Image (tube, rainbow, N blue to C red):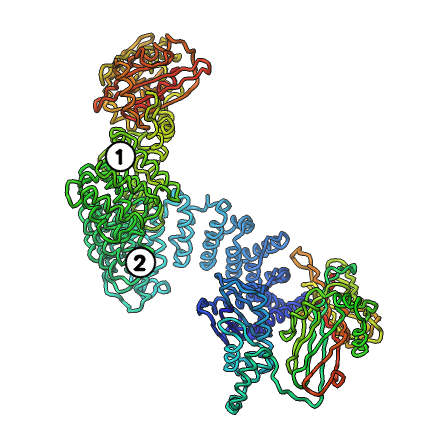
Amino acid sequence: MPAVSKGDGMRGLAVFISDIRNCKSKEAEIKRINKELANIRSKFKGDKALDGYSKKKYVCKLLFIFLLGHDIDFGHMEAVNLLSSNKYTEKQIGYLFISVLVNSNSELIRLINNAIKNDLSSRNPTFMCLSLHCIANVGSREMAEAFAGEIPRILVAGDTMDSVKQSAALCLLRLYKASPDLVLMGEWTSRVVHLLNDQHMGVVTAAISLITCLSSKNPDEFKTCVSLAVSRLSRIVSSASTDLQDYTYYFVPAPWLSCKLLRLLQCYPPPEDGAVKGRLVECLETILNKAQEPPKSKKVQHSNAKNAILFEAISLIIHYDSEPNLLVRACNQLGQFLQHRETNLRYLALESMCTLASSEFSHEAVKTHIETVINALKTERDVSVRQRAADLLYAMCDRSNAKQIVAEMLSYLETADYSIREEMVLKVAILAEKYAVDYSWYVDTILNLIRIAGDYVSEEVWYRVIQIVINRDDVQGYAAKTVFEALQAPACHENMVKVGGYILGEFGNLIAGDPRSSPLVQFNLLHSKFHLCSVPTRALLLSAYIKFINLFPETKATIQEVLRSDSQIRNSDVELQQRAVEYLKLSSIASTDVLATVLEEMPPFPERESSILAKLKKKKGPGAVSVELEDGKERGELNGGGDRGGDAAIAASNASTPSPSADLLGLRSSAPVSGAAPSAGSLLVDVFSEAGPAASSAGVNDDGFLSSAPPSAASEDPAPPLPESDELLNKFVCKNNGVLFENQLLQIGIKSEYRQNLGRMYLFYGNKTSVQFVSFSTTVSCPGELQSQLNVQTKTVEPLVEGGAQVQQVINIECLTDFIDAPLLNIKFRYGGALQNISLKLPVTINKFFQPTEMAAADFFQRWKQLSQPQQEAQKIFKASHGMDTEVLKAKLLGLGTALLENVDPNPENYVCAGVIQTKAQQVGCLLRLEPNAQAQMYRLTLRSSKDTVSQRVCDLLAEQF
Amino acid sequence: MIGGLFIYNHKGEVLISRVYRDDIGRNAVDAFRVNVIHARQQVRSPVTNIARTSFFHVKRSNIWLAAVTKQNVNAAMVFEFLYKMCDVMTAYFGKISEENIKNNFVLIYELLDEILDFGYPQNSETGALKTFITQTGIKSQHHSKEEQSQITSQVTGQIGWRREGIKYRRNELFLDVLESVNLLMSPQGQVLSAHVSGRVVMKSYLSGMPECKFGMNDKIVIDKQGKGGATEEAAGKSDLGGSGGGGGGGKQSIAIDDCTFHQCVRLSKFDAERSISFIPPDGECELMRYRTTKDIILPFRVIPLVREVGRTKLEVKVVIKSNFKPSLLAQKIEVRIPTPLNTSGVQVICMKGKAKYKASENAIVWKIKRMAGMKESQISAEIELLPTNDKKKWARPPISMNFEVPFAPSGLKVRYLKVFEPKLNYSDHDVIKWVRYIGRSGIYETRC
């Protein structure tokens, strides 16, 4: 309280405060306060009016009591009275009380607003400032409603004092932040922007905060501020420090203003005007130059102010990301700071460099500091600085230095702080994967990671190793060898055991030739870890054992012995017990062939976003930003292996991989039971009748034709496919010729023929009107994955279609591999000036590439049995939507392209078909069984093929037909 | 199993800190200070749980005593111990104040060593403690071997609270029945809750190892004896009757809800025969503590009358009636009438005693020195109020009262107290016995 000078001091207040301070206990304090409150109440109640001084004194006491944490429920009226006083001190106390204690009491608010209004129009600068401060301090909606219109006027009025302008700008900022909808700048915008040219530096500083806030909300309206800000900045930067008198802080000219200007510029892209841009670049260069000059003062304030401007300038340079020269200079400057003895500077330098590393211009420059950063990671005292160093290393990593950085991070991990270990582990895992040139290095790195920091290696990391090992043939043998060696260590981390179990179970055969790692040695090694592991790991190991039985029949006896032991077969954990029982049965009952089929090697995993990356993104922290930036880059680099996997199988294994039981077999755990049971059942008993639907339902994208439509725009973009196009498509599953589409203007007929994996389609576009179609064009596109699955070539058509005429278009189709979606046909033409835009699906479905196969009953059943894996089967039970006429059904099945096999099924009602789907990549044998139930009007459709996606797709297609 | 014991001054500075068990860390001291003494909200519960550690505290003027434990202890035991600790300290150096504690801290540590072993309370009998923990260190050096062994055998023996060979020329015995009566009454005069908690305090100056027997008008005992011989009762009455007898009369026996005894009372005998027999410690002791809830004689009746006249004025009229024998005199009567928080002025008129508005306590305090039974007195006050912004209504806290009356509001009477000393040459008749009844107000409130 500056106003309470000696002559004006309130003695009563001072005495009261010292009384309170001297109180020994809380009770004593409360007593003293109660007494004082009673005194004030009696004074306020008293008949004779109080003079301004005592009123001020008592209001002050009330304020003090309130700030001590007691409730005050009176005295507001007296405070409001003080507002109308002419004495500064009384007015000030009144405003203070109002700012601290005001609540939305309707009558008082009106009085207060009235008093504020009077002060605002009083032309006395001190009173105006006081009232502006009060408005800003309260900042309520009521205040904004009352004064949002008035304040901008004061702000830009020519005759307002500078100090009032400052207050007005900050007050307006506060109101804008509190209720932006009430503060409408409209007409004042340009005049507010011109405050940047104000003579008074304080006004500029206050105004720029307001402008920055406003322009971040609606940048377009305040665009003009850029050039003004640049010129202001250049005036400050190039001025000698003495020019600005009061606003020079330890020899730095107006540091706060400079920082704010630079921050304002960060709201906008680089200025387009060459002159302005040149001036700005000049400023930034000057700032960078000044950083090199020897300091003018040894005081810390001097360097702080200077560095604040510098860092703000660097973030502007990074924000523009268009001046290679400046970026490199900034990088070099930061490089100097990396070795500065001030910890805060080092921290800031590392942080800024992290963003610099993501810019293509400065990435190389950042890389030159790698040694310093590594050193910082090792020697920094402060954990937050080390964290930044780790982030920076991550950001600057690329193919050239990946090995070095990963090695350094690994070695640091051994001593790293616990708080950042998990993040470090994720980063190492990502870098190793992203920049892996040879996969043996990758496997080494991750295994090392598990060895060093096993506790912090999350599930995602080791899942990822396994995915990669399974997808890459070349690394499997090496991986098996490495995990085998790693498991030799007397104490390994559980995650290591998991990886080891999985990989040896899959690829143990690759190293079984060496007598040092013979099957039995491998098994004993794994089993030696078994008892130290948790339940999920044990479950995984059991699955590995059953795989061993398949891989190495000679271990069968040993493993069965283990499975049979009470500790497994009577384990208290249900999962373990079930596995032991089932695996034991499976190994003793099933023939080697069945065993081989059931325990086949895992199919490759589909390409998806690295789960580790997803995890790192989830973890908050500045590292995440740079991760996102590089996400795009990363996709292409890693695992170029491509989409080898089919969907359904993968979905099934997807589902099982992250599950706690980490099922190796890709089966539900009930599967081995049903697999073991049918020793002598009828031939067509569905071996996996239970597991089948589950597996398929896990993997089905219900409607393969779900269009991934391009965004619907009225203009030249292709329109989204018509809603009925799926229906149209279904019409053509079992027939090759017909009318594809018809409306008032256009009719499209279709004629197609298929041989092997090739097809030719004739499209006939008929103009039904008498007016010609102008700029007629058609395009066939393969959305998404389809591009790699189908090869479609079209011949262009005449751009003019006369009224009543018909044009023909030939489309050649080559099936590369099996597919789900249908290619899109987009037709565009102008009819009477209006643009017509039609999108359809071309009736190209997988079954078109069927080649019928005749076979005898015995043959059929043998093949049927061979295709007994659950993901190979697709089954649907559905209601008949058309009649169940035998001849119609037969015609449809023949139209499908398969051969209808007579006298195969024991039940003559049923239909059995066989065919081979011809694609360029492979041939997929396909068996079909349709069981109509005339009473229930239901069908059961079962499809088996050597490829899961095919079964699923054909089943879906066919189900719509009956 | 008390883990540790801390004593703080009003600022939260630790004066005494004694840790008995390893599970209590040093940070427990600070935890209590931060969470209880310096808590933003006043902590009302005497038991506070902080991070699985329980703190039991009592406050004596400005001094906090806190017992700490991590185990699930009997809270009543801990508080009993804390009260005993206070009694012991008072007996050694008078009032418990910061200065006294600082001056006697060696003594306090010595006491703490003796009365708690590994967190288990041991002997807390002041008389016994004083024989071997003395305030002047020199004296203990003059103890002879025999004296020391005598102390050991006494402290570890069966009757740890009394040593042998005590001799008095005059065998005297003082018995005080101290009761505090608690009441909550509705404005209409309906009793919402009432109970009496009482203590029987004994001061004995008896020679040898006397065997005492104490009798009172406990309902169970009376009923039992009503069938058997009534002779003993008559004898007791002739001995001690007379001085008691407040207002109630008529009722011969009272129902005691629960009672606790000093360790000298033979509990097995009490359980079997309901007779209270004991060898008393020399000097003062609290023989028993009890509580009754039925048929309480309420010494005073408070009739409040509060009238709100507009928003700025309140008229209060309170009448008190004394409800006991006219021959008895109540003393130290104080009626406390709370005033609203926005009181700006008070005018009081009372016929008897003195009344004053105490702003610091937000109450009118009316004091009367003496008042006979079956009388009534009246006070009326005009309270001026200041209009406030809050629409909150005044909560109207109850009117409370303090007093002291020379009878037991529970109706308890001492029927006899017999002393037998077979070895020495004095009989029951030779002992001079004094009995006194004092009834005080506990929380005696009437809503208005």
When the figure is inspected, residue B401 is found, relative to residue A803, above or below; the finding is below
Marking on residue A602: 1
User: Which quarter of the picture shows residue A695?
Assistant: top left
Q: Secondary structure at mark 1?
A: loop
Marking on residue A962: none
Provide the chain ID for the residue under circle 2. A
Task: Name the kind of residue labelled 2 in the image.
Answer: Asp
Q: Is residue A788 left or right of residue B346?
A: left
Relative to the observer, which residue lies in front, B290 or A248?
Answer: B290
Relative to the observer, which residue lies in front, B322 or B237?
Answer: B237
**Horizontal and vertical percent for residue A906?**
35, 14
The C terminus of chain A is located in which quarter?
A: top left
**Horizontal and vertical percent for residue A390?**
27, 54
Q: Secondary structure at mark 2?
A: loop
Provide the chain ID for the residue under circle 1. A
Q: Is residue A515 left or right of residue B269?
A: left
Disc 2: which residue:
A417
What residue is shown at x 25% (from left), y 56% (from top)? A412
How far is disc 2 from disc 1 in space, using C-alphas? 38 Å
Task: Name the kind of residue labelled 1 in the image.
Answer: Met
The 10 Å Cα crowd at callout 1, few under 14, some 14 to 19, many 20 or more, is: some
Relative to the observer, which residue lies in front, B86 or A497?
Answer: A497
User: Which quarter of the picture shows residue A551?
Assistant: top left
Q: Residue furthest bottom?
A: B142
Q: Residue furthest left?
A: A514
Nearer to us of marks 2 and 1 is 1
The answer to whether any part of residue A286 appears in the image is no
What residue is shown at x 45% (from left), y 15% (from top)? A937
